[in-house]
Image (spheres, grey):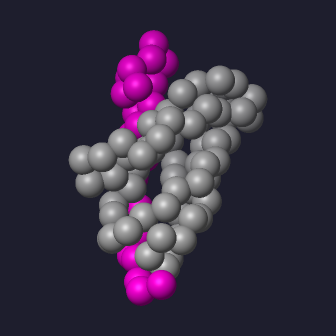
Amino acid sequence: RVTLDAPASVRRGQTFVVTGRVTPAGPRRVVTLAGDGKTFTTLTTRADGSFSGRVRLQMRTTLSVVLPDTATLDGAVSGPRVVRVGRS
C-alpha cells in the first residue's frame, strides 16, 4: 500500500512538501512522484516506510506516487491527490 499527502491548494510557483508511506515498511525503496503524465521526482523511503519531498507546480495537477514493480507490492500506486494552484 502507498499513501500520499499533499496540500489541497498552493500558490503558483510555491514550493510545498508532499509526504507519504509505503507499507509494508522498508528502507531505501524508490518511489516516483508523478502527475498528469509527468514525472516530478523520485523519492526514497526511510526505514519506517515514510518519504517526503518538495514540489513546485504552475497549474492544477493530480499527483500520485508509484512504487515500481517489486516482489511484494506489484507496482503499487497511491490514490490521486488534486492540488489546485492559485495566483501568486
Q: Residue at x 33, y 70 (%)?
A: 59
Is residue 5 visible to the viewer in this orientation of the structure? no
Q: What secondary structure do most residues of the magenta stretch adopt?
A: loop
At x 41%, y 25%, the residue is 68
In-front residue for pair 80/55: 55
Q: Position of residue 49 (x, y in %)?
A: 66, 35
- Point out residue 2 in the picture as x, y percentages from the top left corner: 50, 41
Q: In this view, does 53 lie above or below 75?
A: below
The residue drawn where x is 59% and y is 54% is 54
Q: Can residue 47 be seen in this view?
A: yes
Q: In the rendered image of this protein, does residue 65 appear above or below residue 46?
A: below
Is residue 74 in the magenta section?
yes
Residue 39 image point, x, y percent: 36, 42
Q: Which residue lies furthest to the right in this view?
A: 47
Q: Is residue 75 left or right of residue 5?
A: left
The span shown in magenta is 66-88
- Seen from this angle, which residue lies furthest bottom? 87
Q: Nearer the viewer, residue 73 or 8?
A: 8
Instruction: Judge whether 50 appears above or below 14 on screen.
Output: above
Residue 36 horizontal/vertical position (percent): 26, 54
Answer with the quarter of the image where residue 84 lies.
Answer: bottom left
In this figure, what is the number of numbered marks?
A: 0
Residue 69 appears left or right of 21: left
